[in-house]
Amino acid sequence: MGFLDFILGVKKRKVESYLKNGALILDVRTKREWNNGHIPNAIHIPLNELKEKIDDVKKLNKPIIVCCQSGVRSAKAAKFLNLNNIDATNGGGWISLKSKL
């Protein structure tokens, strides 16, 4: 097993663990990206609106798996959520995440 396989396996196990604990999926892409396809039952809050909607996310009282197009914005969003005492992890790109569900 190579290093990349190890990292991807860790990420997959973390996502699986979050799902077992009732996590919700938060998609932080733009509305246009969302309209072109998304994971069913995911919550959509574009990254640029997340700060103003943080209380709405807190009210969900669930762990969060964040996704975007490639994983860059979702990493930023997960970090922001963690800094605001919300249990969140970066799920990466939505298409890749969808294949793990």
Image (spheres, grey):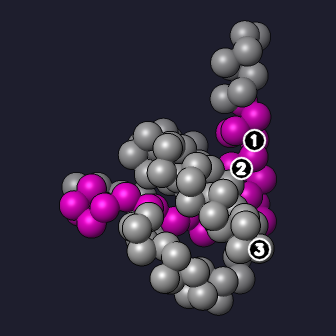
Q: Are marks 3 and 1 in contact (CB under 8 Å)?
A: no
> Magenta segment range?
9-35
> Residue at 63% across / 64% down in the picture?
80
Q: Which residue is mark 2?
A: 16
Indicate whether residue 14 is drawn in magenta: yes
Is 5 positioned to the left or the right of 74 in the image? right
**SS majority, magenta:** helix
User: Is residue 9 shown above or below 73?
Assistant: above
Q: Quadrant of residue 82?
A: bottom right
Question: Which quadrant of the rendered structure holds the N terminus?
Answer: top right
Is residue 56 depicted above or below 98 in this figure?
A: below
Judging depth in this view, the residue of 87 and 73 nearest the camera is: 73
- Label 2 close to label 1 by CB (< 8 Å): yes
The Cα–Cα distance between marks 2 and 1, rounded to whole angstroms, is: 5 Å
| Mark 2 crowdedness (10 Å alpha carbons): few <14, some 14-19, many ≥20 | some
Q: Which mark is residue 85?
A: 3
Q: Which residue in the protein does label 1 denote? A: 13
The answer for how far apart the CA atoms under marks 3 and 1 are is 22 Å
Residue type at numbered disc 2 = Glu
Q: Earlier in the sequence, mark 3 or mark 2?
A: 2
In the figure, residue 3 lies in which quadrant? top right
Question: Sequence order check: which comes first, mark 3 or mark 1?
Answer: 1
**Residue type, label 3:** Asn
Q: Residue at x 72, y 10 (%)?
A: 2
